[in-house]
Image: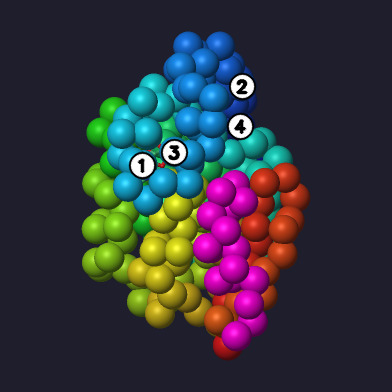
Amino acid sequence: MSTLIQQPVAGLLQRLFTQAADTSSPVFASFADGELQRLMHSKTEYQSFYARLKDLPLAVSPATGTLLYMLARSCKAQSIVEFGTSFGISTLHLAAALRDNGGGRLVTSEFEASKVAKARAHLEEGGLLDLVEIRQGDALQTLAVDLPASIDLVLLDGAKALYPEILALLESRLRPGALIIADNAEHSPEYLERVRSTANGYLSIAFAEDVELSMRLG
Ligand SMILES: C[S@@+](CC[C@H](N)C(=O)[O-])C[C@H]1O[C@@H](n2cnc3c(N)ncnc32)[C@H](O)[C@@H]1O
């Protein structure tokens, strides 16, 4: 059996994904034409952009969540770093994989205090909080220090424009064969250019819905 499909995690994820599927929030309609696209590409306005979205889960899809669990299990990940915790939906999938791999450490990062509180409560409800360190603050700072010596898997799902900078912070710790999953990476052409060049030390493909899957060579 697997932590992902057993209680309490299965029921919790069902509830959270139902909530995440609700797109009726007026916040979505509050963006002017082209504004959303511009903000998703911005390296300077991401804090105010995500502050507007602070009450929304903005979660990976259920299929991407399952993919995260499968990849973390199949590479026997013990050390995972996540950029963009939000309500902790992707975090629950990754932490469930750590549990089923026999344990490990997941460092995740979120700057919205209310989201950190929600994610912590969800991980506690799922019985997975002991595996997760949630770092509150801008990941450009919180992921610049005290990283695991070796990283098996990375999820990039915070401000899209910062994917190259966050990857640069983690790069020296990626073990050969480490997997990097980037959600909605089409909003960072700079990131795609970097990981799609073997000269930069990666193999990378567009994989499944909205996901760029990359592997560290070496
Ligand atoms: C798309 S959501 C993450 C969804 C989450 N991975 C899930 O599937 O449940 C992106 C989150 O990243 C956070 N974020 C964006 N840029 C950040 C940064 N520079 N540092 C910390 N958190 C950031 C936002 O507040 C938002 O909650």
Answer with left or right where residue 139 lies relative to residue 217. Answer: left
| Residue at x 52% of width, y 43% of height | 90
Provide residue 176's location: percent of width, then percent of height: 56, 82
Badge 3 vs badge 1, beta-carbon distance below 8 Å: yes
Against 55, residue 184 (above or below) is below
Against 175, residue 27 (above or below) is above
Q: Cβ of disc 1 within 8 Å of ligand 1?
A: yes
Residue 203 falls in which quadrant of the image?
Answer: bottom right
Tell me the quarter of the image containing the C terminus.
bottom right
Residue 119 falls in which quadrant of the image?
Answer: top left
Provide residue 114's location: percent of width, then percent of height: 29, 28
Query: Which mark, residue 10?
Result: 4
Q: Is residue 161 magenta?
A: no
The part of the chain drawn in magenta is 184-199
Q: Amino acid at mark 2?
A: Ala
Mark 3: few/some/many CA within 10 Å (<14, 14-19, 20+): many
